[in-house]
Amino acid sequence: MRELPRKLSVDELAELFEGRTRLVELLAERDDPLGAAVDEVLVTIRHKDKVAALNAHPAIGQRAGLSARSAAEQGSDADPAVLDELARLNLAYEDRFGFRFVVFVNRRPKAEILEIMRERIQNPPGAELDTACRELVAIARDRWTRT
């Protein structure tokens, strides 16, 4: 397990966050990017930059176009009924909030994620944006420490 570094490059952060976004660029300027992400950077960036960072991440249950890392994290449990429900809820979530649902899967089965989606889709938009961003950072931290 790796410890969090004092500095990460844009490329290293882009890999952790699934793309180069304004969030990644701002984090690369920090000495402790993953430590500063939630309390220092996410509270200062614009709504559209948060949305762009979330939308760079693959949808939960997505079947194609995943990075190797995302595919491994999402697992291979492919119950068609669960995948269909994830697709339906992903659309409903994106229609409601205007950004992709992001959750730190942490090796949980997709059926368990369905319950989380059903709960979070009821959140007020501002609270859900904050929750999704915190989840995005949790994923990046986990990715860094596990590789």
Image (cartoon, rainbow, N blue to C red):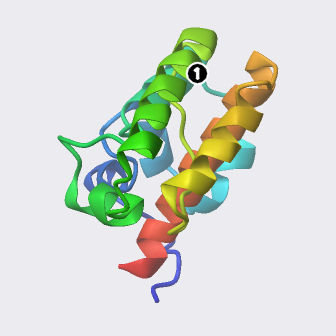
- Decide which of 3, 138 is in the foreground and name it: 138
Residue at the image position 47 percent from the left and 19 percent from the top = 91
| Vertical order, 86 against 109 (above or below) | above
Q: Position of residue 68 (x, y in %)?
A: 21, 60
Quadrant of image for the C terminus: bottom left
- Decide which of 98, 85 is in the foreground and name it: 85
Density class for disc 1 (Cα within 10 Å; few <14, some 14-19, many ≥20) is some
Q: Is residue 12 visible?
A: no
Q: Is residue 147 left or right of residue 53?
A: left
Q: Is residue 58 visible?
A: yes
- Decide which of 110, 41 is in the foreground and name it: 110
| Vertical order, 87 against 110 (above or below) | above
Q: Position of residue 52 (x, y in %)?
A: 44, 24
Q: Is residue 3 left or right of residue 116?
A: left
Residue at the image position 48 percent from the left and 36 percent from the top = 86
What SS does tag 1 mark? helix
Which residue appears farthest toward the left when viewing the image? 65
Q: Position of residue 96 (x, y in %)?
A: 63, 11
Which residue appears farthest toward the bottom when viewing the image? 1
Number of marks present in the image shown: 1
Q: Is residue 15 left or right of residue 51?
A: left
Residue at the image position 37 percent from the left and 56 percent from the top = 16
Residue at the image position 36 percent from the left and 33 percent from the top = 56
| Residue position marked by numbered label 1 in the rendering | 93
Q: Position of residue 13 (x, y in %)?
A: 37, 54
| Vertical order, 51 against 81 (above or below) | above
- Decide which of 64, 9 is in the foreground and name it: 64
Q: Amino acid at mark 1?
A: Tyr
The answer to which quarter of the image holds residue 117 is: top right
